[in-house]
Image: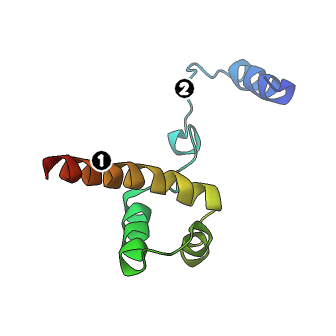
Amino acid sequence: MIRQQVAKWCRSFQASREHVENRNMEASGRPSSSRTGINTARVEEIIQRDRRVTVREIASELDLSYGNVQRILIPICILFLLLINTFSFAL
């Protein structure tokens, strides 16, 4: 834990703060993710438009990082592979 953060907490409790929860809950917690439904839909749309598109091209077009595009693509690719395997065994 950062020493400055502990000092800040000590000052706030000395100034009669009574609760340990953050007053501003929007600022606490994990930062927002780029793996949202909107970005996932946009990635799927790009793939449907051109199935030979690269991860870098998707990242550039959507202004996302390479890693974020990879994280969006993994569930899409797994679903695609499951569907392919399901239909190939059904024949």
Front residue of 24 and 2: 2
Furthest residue toward front? 91
Q: Is residue 49 above or below residue 86?
A: below
* Labels 1 and 2 touching (C-beta < 8 A): no
What kind of element bears circle 2? loop
Q: How many marks?
A: 2
Image side of residue 23 versus residue 37, left or right? right
- Earlier sequence position, callout 1 versus callout 2: 2
Q: Position of residue 60 (x, y in %)?
A: 61, 75
What kind of element bears circle 1? helix
Kind of residue sitting beneath label 1: Leu
Image side of residue 85 versus residue 2, left or right? left
**How is the rendered protein coloured?**
rainbow
Q: Nearer the viewer, mark 1 or mark 2?
A: 1
Furthest residue toward right? 3
Residue name at image x 40 percent, y 61 percent: 40
Kindly identify which numbered label has been placed on residue 82.
Answer: 1
Kind of residue sitting beneath label 2: Glu
Image side of residue 57 versus residue 36, left or right? right
Report the Cα–Cα distance between label 1 and label 2. 44 Å
Q: Is residue 83 above or below residue 15?
A: below
Residue name at image x 76 percent, y 20 percent: 10
Residue name at image x 73 percent, y 24 percent: 9
Q: Position of residue 46 (x, y in %)?
A: 42, 75
Q: Position of residue 61 (x, y in %)?
A: 56, 78
Q: Residues within 10 Å of mark 2 (few under 14, many from 20)?
A: few
Kindly identify which numbered label has been placed on residue 21.
Answer: 2
Q: Is residue 76 above or below residue 61?
A: above
Q: Position of residue 73 (x, y in %)?
A: 47, 57
Front residue of 23 and 78: 78
Q: Residues within 10 Å of mark 1 (few under 14, many from 20)?
A: few
